[in-house]
Image (tube, helix red, strand yellow):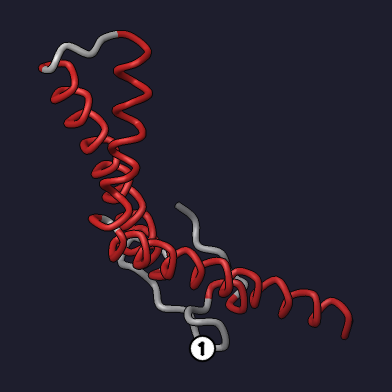
Amino acid sequence: MARVQSAHLLTWPPGAASPSWHPRGIVRATVHYARTVMRATLFYTLLRILLFFAAALVLALFGVHGITLLVVALVISSIISLPLLSKLRDRMSASLTRRVDSFQARLDEGTRAEDVD
């Protein structure tokens, strides 16, 4: 992966003096994104899927089949996930919000820089 020379695009957090390079040339911001936002999102999604399959398995053991099984399992897993996964959902939401806010700040900074030119 080639290194980009434009330092204002690579600084993390926005406004930092200089970019921090990963030994392989990847900006630490990308690594930070992969470790926090993607991990939280993937973990939350995996737990939601596991809750759905657990509910479907229990319903199948009680003799529910077909589309009814899918609909009832979806409703039950959704109801269970509301209190059970609320902290994880909040963490994922906060991570995504920070990421979007930092991206928007960099876009605004780039727009201001273009307006000056």
Is label 1 in a helix, a strand or a loop? loop
Position of residue 38 measured from the top left corner of the image (x, y, whole percent): 37, 54
110 relative position to 61: left or right: right
- The correct choice, above or below, for 19 with respect to 59 in the image is below
Disc 1 residue crowd, few under 14, some 14–19, many 20+, Cα 10 Å? few
Q: Name the foreground residue: 34 vs 28.
A: 34
Q: Residue at x 56, y 64 (%)?
A: 4
Q: Nearer the viewer, residue 36 or 106?
A: 36
Task: Residue lying at the far left in this picture: please name it.
Answer: 61
Give me the residue at 29% from left, 61% from top: 88
Looking at the picture, tell me which residue is in the foreground, 48 or 74: 74
Q: Toward which corner of the image does residue 75 lie, by quadrant? A: top left
Q: Is residue 81 left or right of residue 18?
A: left
Which of the two residues, 78 or 15, is positioned nearer the viewer here?
78
Q: Which residue is mark 1?
A: 16
Residue at 18% in and 22% down: 59
Residue 107, image x, y percentages: 70, 71
Q: Position of residue 20 (x, y in %)?
A: 40, 78
The picture places residue 49, in percent across and down from the top left corner, at 28, 35
In percent of the image, x 26 and y 50: which residue is there? Answer: 43
Type of amino acid under label 1: Ala
